[in-house]
Image: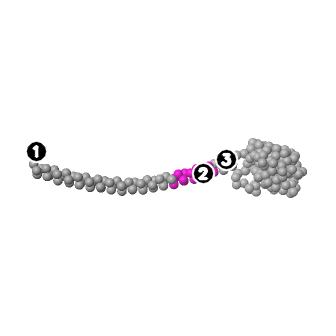
Amino acid sequence: MFNIIPQAADAIYSWSNLLIVLGAMLALVGTVGAVWSGGVREKFADERITANEAETAKAKAETAQALLEQERLKSVMSWRRVTPTQAKKLATALSDKSIEPWLAWVGDDPEATMFRGDLEAALSAAGIKTKYFSGYARAVGLSVKGGTSEERQTLLQAFHAAGLPLYESDQVGLMKGQLEITVGTRPPPDFHGKDL
């Protein structure tokens, strides 16, 4: 069949068997290496996934904190207004009171002017007659002064029941001791009325 001598056929046979055994060993080593390195790769992939999940959670927490801060800043920067609910509460608390306060404000401050208008409407709805004065050049917050102690307490209780930040001032108003609500410039967030 082939023109080779028996010794050559034996040598080819021996080498072929050796290569088969060597190939099987290489296949075994390759399989073991692939299985082992696959496990190692999975471990690193799991660590990366865990790290990414932790970073995602941190980013979500930071985003939530930033949104809260944004809402806080909006509330600090927004103009004061009297809501319909606050106006109703004010009207309920003052409905049977007979007081006639001055409603004074910083006339050059558009926010204070708008807020004073809201307060005027709410007080009118409560049946309270007010007098006007916009001669203040500088005032902060929403304060009551003058009048009797009972009148001031009536206003303080009504405003607080409505959620409006009225405070009692010991300064002398421009209305010569008459009951006066002063609408000043919007105060800073940490203002407590007694800071002046």
Q: Amino acid at mark 1?
A: Asn
Near-viewer residue (190 or 57): 57
Q: Amino acid at mark 2?
A: Ala
> Which residues are drawn in magenta?
54-68
Q: Amino acid at mark 3?
A: Lys
Q: Position of residue 1 (x, y in %)?
A: 12, 44
Q: Which mark is residue 3?
A: 1
Residue 132, quarter of the rendered image: top right
Is 110 situated left or right of 50 in this image? right
Q: Which mark is residue 64?
A: 2
Q: Secondary structure at mark 1?
A: loop
Return the residue at label 3.
74
Callout in the foreground (1, 2): 1
Whole-Å distance between the Cαs marked 3 and 1? 98 Å
**Earlier sequence position, callout 3 versus callout 2:** 2
- Asked if labels 1 and 3 touch by Cβ distance under 8 angstroms, the answer is no
The C terminus lies in quadrant: bottom right
Near-viewer residue (149 or 74): 74
In this rendering, the count of numbered labels is 3
Callout in the foreground (3, 2): 2
**Earlier sequence position, callout 3 versus callout 1:** 1
